[in-house]
Amino acid sequence: MVRYGFVIDLRSCIGCGACVAACSEENTPQLKTISPDAEVPLGGRRDIIIVEKGLFPAIARIPLHHTCMHCEDAPCTHVCPTGATFKTEDGIVLIDYALCIGCKYCVEACPYNARYVNEALGGPDKCTMCVHRVRKGLRPACETACPTGSIIWGDLDDPNSEASRKAARAIPIGAQLGTKPKVFVIPPA
């Protein structure tokens, strides 16, 4: 059994936004097959928020990544009345746009605010972990675009995967919410 997730190493992330741009560029063509006007706006499925920490003159700029956590116990899947929001066997939380009625219950249920309303689709949208790439044996676009190798994707249950090894030393984002998120961070020093 596979359980995909991300580890984001904030010690090396420079907040450049290459992952955000790659997400939009990679996933917009996928959405256009559903609706010709649909696109993934920059910051829609993945974003970086720069947080300043410390006192002047020693202010650290920390790039926090905002994306779907692909939770083990995903609240969005529990509230969807049609089953359009579901979790795959490998743990990726997806939306079946053909089943989605646009009620936006999943948007409200997400404690991470990781979903947004895509007007061209008439409903919610979110990170898909580039499932169309993963099914072809490729890696998510955000990871491949990262110039510093700060985004690590892989099977969290495979002790030989880099993602699993790094997740063992990382902190799950929002673990206190009880959703069992599969996005981890290694905090800056």
Image (spheres, rainbow, N blue to C red):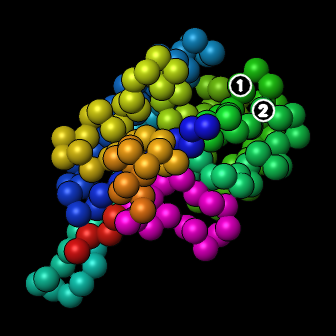
Name the residue beneath numbered marker 2: 84
Determine which quarter of the picture holds residue 3. Answer: top right
Q: Nearer the viewer, residue 67 or 178?
A: 178
Q: Are marks 2 and 1 in contact (CB under 8 Å)?
A: yes
Secondary element at tag 1: loop
Q: Nearer the viewer, residue 25 or 179?
A: 179
Give the x, y percent position of residue 143: 33, 38
| Residue at (74, 37) in percent of width and height | 85
Region in magenta: 169-185
Residue 15, compared with residue 139, is above or below; it is: below
Regarding residue 17, the answer to whether it shows in the image is yes
Task: Check the picture and name the quadrant holding the N terminus.
Answer: top right
Any mark on residue 97, and which?
Answer: 1
Give the x, y percent position of residue 19: 32, 40
**10 Å crowding of disc 2: few (<14), some (14-19), many (20+):** some
What amino acid type should be assigned to the residue bearing mark 1?
A: Tyr
**10 Å crowding of disc 1: few (<14), some (14-19), many (20+):** some
Query: Is 111 placed left or right of 141 in the picture?
Result: right
Q: Nearer the viewer, residue 34 or 150?
A: 150
